[in-house]
Amino acid sequence: MYISGAVRHPGLYHVRTTTRWADVVQAAGGLTDDADSRQVNLARYARDQENLSIPAKGEQAVSTTGDVAVVSGSGNGGSTNADAVGKQIDLNAATLADLQTISGVGPKRAQDIIDYRDQHGGFKSVDELKDISGIGDKIFADLEPHLMVGSAP
């Protein structure tokens, strides 16, 4: 993952599945004096190909996974940029990592979504998620605001 912003040694750091953002900050030499760590959930697990910019006081924290930005919150484990500014993840372009930025989507559900997309030539509507085993009305209602359908691959 890449870390920048208000840290002493910005750069690229290797992460494991058990690496937390706090570990990456520590590896980057710690926070600078003007860092606003209250905006960043340092307990969150870091992911490969993710970017984290530690904000200075008065800035907003943003990390990215692939092409999807993730605005981190101080108590909610982070939320997708879709929550913050109305952008949504395109089901027809999303990677496994992109889908996992959505609360309630883990590795298996993300893979199920990608498998469905590959088997059906892409999504024509977000409603097709309900055709995937394990995604019922409640889960669909939680996921729908974060997703959209662009052109099929």
Image (cartoon, rainbow, N blue to C red):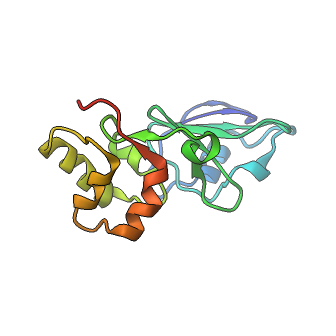
Q: Nearer the viewer, residue 134 or 17?
A: 134
Can residue 92 be seen here? The reply is yes
Image quarter of residue 105: bottom left
Q: Position of residue 72 (x, y in %)?
A: 64, 48
Query: Toward the viewer: 138 or 57?
Result: 138
Instruction: Tell me which residue sits at (29%, 29%) in the image.
Output: 151
Q: Residue at x 32, y 69 (%)?
A: 136
Give the quadrant of residue 140. Answer: bottom left
**Residue 60 place in picture, x, y as percent:** 74, 38
What is the x, y in percent for residue 110?
A: 32, 53
Q: How many marks?
A: 0
- Of the pair 87 and 43, the residue shown nearer to us: 87
The residue under the point 25% across, 47% down is 114
Residue 152 in the image: state x and y as whole percent.
Answer: 25, 32
Q: Residue furthest left?
A: 119
The structure residue drawn at horizontal position 57% and vertical position 42%, both measured from the top left corner, is: 81
Q: Is residue 128 left or right of residue 65?
A: left
Above or below for 147 versus 77:
above
Work out whether residue 17 can be spotted. Answer: no
Quadrant for the C terminus in the image: top left
